[in-house]
Amino acid sequence: MKRMKGTVENNVVVLADGAQLPEGAAVEVRLRRSKAEREAERRRKIKEAVDQILANQITRYVGMDEVIEEVKREMNLELPDARPHVSRQRPRRPSLSWYNIEHV
């Protein structure tokens, strides 16, 4: 599929750089949004995302497992658990006695 640029003059598309198409050729015309329109759309999407974040603020610690489970529920996914249940206790530090350090 070849792309060509042009402008509309008197309700007729005039191709740029004097390009020509064969008579009877089927074409598809897509109206291109201006840079200002594209920027306005981008800003609107950002504002929507920020508004959604502010409306759903997380006020407590949330582990990744909980986030994954919420996404699975929202998307109606039938996936296995993210990982097997693991104790949330902090691992014990090893005793320093095995270093067998003698004071001088």
Image (cartoon, rainbow, N blue to C red):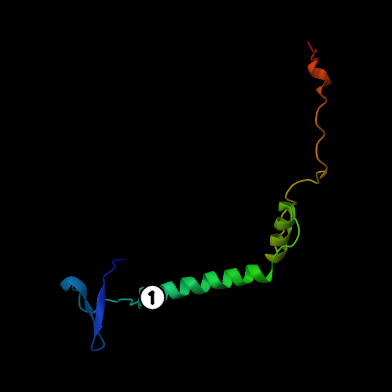
The outermost residue toward the bottom is 10
Indicate the position of residue 56 as horizontal and vertical percent values.
69, 68
User: Residue 69: where, in percent of width, then height?
Assistant: 73, 58
Instruction: Please tell me in which quadrant of the rendered image residue 27 appears.
Output: bottom left
Residue 74 coordinates in the image, percent (x, y): 70, 66
Position of 86 compared to 32: left or right? right
Residue 75 located left or right of residue 3: right
Q: Could you tell me which residue is drawn at 22 percent across and 75 percent down?
A: 15
In the figure, 44 relative to 68: above or below? below
| Picture layout, residue 72 above or below residue 24 | above
Q: Name the residue under label 1.
A: 36
Q: Mark 1 belongs to which amino acid? A: Ala
Left or right for 48, reference 7: right
Residue 21 visible in image: no
Instruction: Provide the secondary structure element on which disc 1 rests.
Output: helix
Q: Quadrant of residue 18?
A: bottom left
Judge from the rendering whether residue 1 lies leftward or rightward of residue 38; answer left or right.
Answer: left
User: Around disc 1, counting alpha carbons within 10 Å, would you say few (fewer than 14), some (14 to 19), or many (20 or more)?
Assistant: few
Indicate the position of residue 7 as horizontal and vertical percent values.
Answer: 25, 79
Question: Which residue does the image show at 67% across and 71% down from the upper left?
Answer: 55
In the picture, the quarter occupied by the N terminus is bottom left
